[in-house]
Image (cartoon, rainbow, N blue to C red):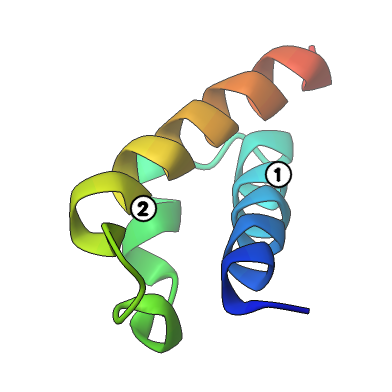
Amino acid sequence: MKKTSRLLAGLVLVMGRAAESMAPFDEAYDKTDWSRFEHLPLFRSANRMNAYNTYLQLEHEAK
């Protein structure tokens, strides 16, 4: 699996667990070790936004 695919799978896994347990997004994001993906293009500018959008979508689906 390519690193971008791993990152996306990780977003769904981590943010899905957070949304399911009703953990605050900031707490879940800050607890996650993203270091293995920091070298990916646009990681710093896009990851938090992608994680938040994933969290919101999965939170909505959990309702």
User: Which sits in the foreground, 31 or 42?
Assistant: 42
Judged left or right of residue 60, residue 4 is left
> 10 Å neighbourhood of mark 1: few (<14), some, or many (≥20)?
many
Q: Residue at x 54, y 22 (%)?
A: 56
The kind of residue tagged 2 is Glu
Judged left or right of residue 7, residue 42 is left
The kind of residue tagged 1 is Gly
**Residue 57, x across and y down, in percent:** 64, 21
Judged left or right of residue 29, residue 11 is right
Residue 21 drawn above or below residue 6: above
Residue 1, located in which quarter of the rendered image? bottom right
Does any portion of residue 7 appear in the rendered image? yes
- Name the residue that disc number 1 marks: 16
- Name the residue that disc number 2 marks: 27
Judged from this view, the residue extending furthest toward the bottom is: 36
Which quadrant is home to the C terminus?
Answer: top right
User: Which sits in the foreground, 5 or 22?
Assistant: 5
**Residue 4, x across and y down, in percent:** 57, 66
- Secondary structure type for disc 1: helix
Residue 56 drawn above or below residue 41: above
Does any portion of residue 24 appear in the rendered image? no
> 10 Å neighbourhood of mark 2: few (<14), some, or many (≥20)?
few
Distance of mark 1 from mark 2, alpha carbons? 13 Å
Residue 56's tag is none
- Secondary structure type for disc 2: helix
Judged from this view, the residue extending furthest toward the left is: 45
